[in-house]
Image (spheres, rainbow, N blue to C red):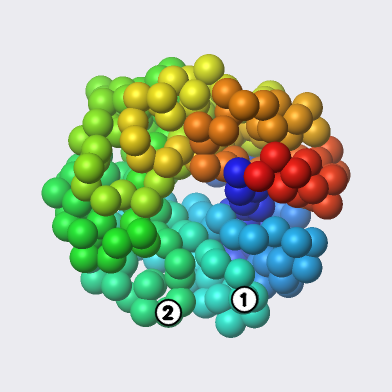
Amino acid sequence: MILFPAIDLKDGQCVRLKLGDMNQATVFNDDPAAQAKSFEDQGFEYLHVVDLNGAFAGESVNGAAVEQILKTVKFPVQLGGGIRTLDHIEAWLDKGLARVILGTVAVRDPELVKEAAKKWPGQVAVGTDAKGGMVAVEGWAETSELSIVELAKRFEGAGVAAIIYTDIDRDGILAGINWDSTLDLARSTSIPVIASGGLASMDDIERMTRPEYQVLEGAISGRALYDGRIDSREALAKLRAVA
């Protein structure tokens, strides 16, 4: 069970959004590389990064900040937001990313995702962001007519490394992850599922240690780590004790 600390990038700063709204952003650090190093020093094993501006623009916007993170830390980094082409994927992997996360393009062009997963085994994940159980795209600005389970089934057996599931209705408000939907998704696919959106407290960490939650690869935490609601060392110790 991996606990991924999250760095969401907006205008070169580490922020957390409320309910996916770019106008409701709280700045937590204006030095993303320093924040990444802090997470590494705390003992985390894998970093989750999102280029929020890039998700809306359809191309990398906070690339300089991501590159500085990659130069600063040694632990693996996964990145989502604005990665829409094979050239985008190749460029980021060449710069040292461990894994790219494809969101909008997974809905718009699933064949590209399958091609990428075949070309770069273990390095392509799908980001599934949902409003009311339906997949949202274009930086959460639009909702599709595709359910999260339907999207997952598109990539069954394609070699996708993981599915990252975010319930936008809970993201950034410390309401707790939508565990029911997340576990339903994990049980419906053989692709590893990572929970995201609303990890709120040590109670959520405790829940993740239960046997029925071991179907998940891990969970992503943002705001609760930044404001101290989750103690990183205690959380990591609890999850490692289960392994």
Q: Residue at x 70, y 40 (%)?
A: 242
Is residue 155 visible in the rendered image? The answer is: yes
The one nearer the camera, 170 or 189, is 189
Instruction: Give SS at disc 1.
Output: loop
Report the side of 149 relative to 196 (left or right): left
Q: Residues within 10 Å of mark 2 (few under 14, many from 20)?
A: few
Q: Residue 74: give its label.
A: 1
Task: Look at label 2 and name its amino acid.
Answer: Lys
Relative to residue 24, is residue 147 drawn left or right? left
The C terminus: image quadrant: top right
- Say which quarter of the image contains residue 190: top left
Q: Nearer the viewer, mark 1 or mark 2?
A: 1
Number of marks in picture: 2
Q: Position of residue 173 (x, y in %)?
A: 68, 30
Q: Amino acid at mark 1?
A: Lys
Q: Nearer the viewer, residue 109 or 31?
A: 109
x then y, percent, for residue 238 = 78, 41
- At horizontal 28% and vertical 65% (from top left) the residue drawn is 120
Relative placement, left or right, of 215 versus 210 is: left
Where residue 133 appears, as percent x and y from the top left, is: 40, 20
Residue shown at 69%/32% (left/top)? 209
The image's mark for residue 95 is 2
The picture places residue 230, in percent across and down from the top left corner, at 81, 41
The image quadrant where one finds the N terminus is top right
Residue drawn at the location 21% of the way across and 65% of the way down: 119
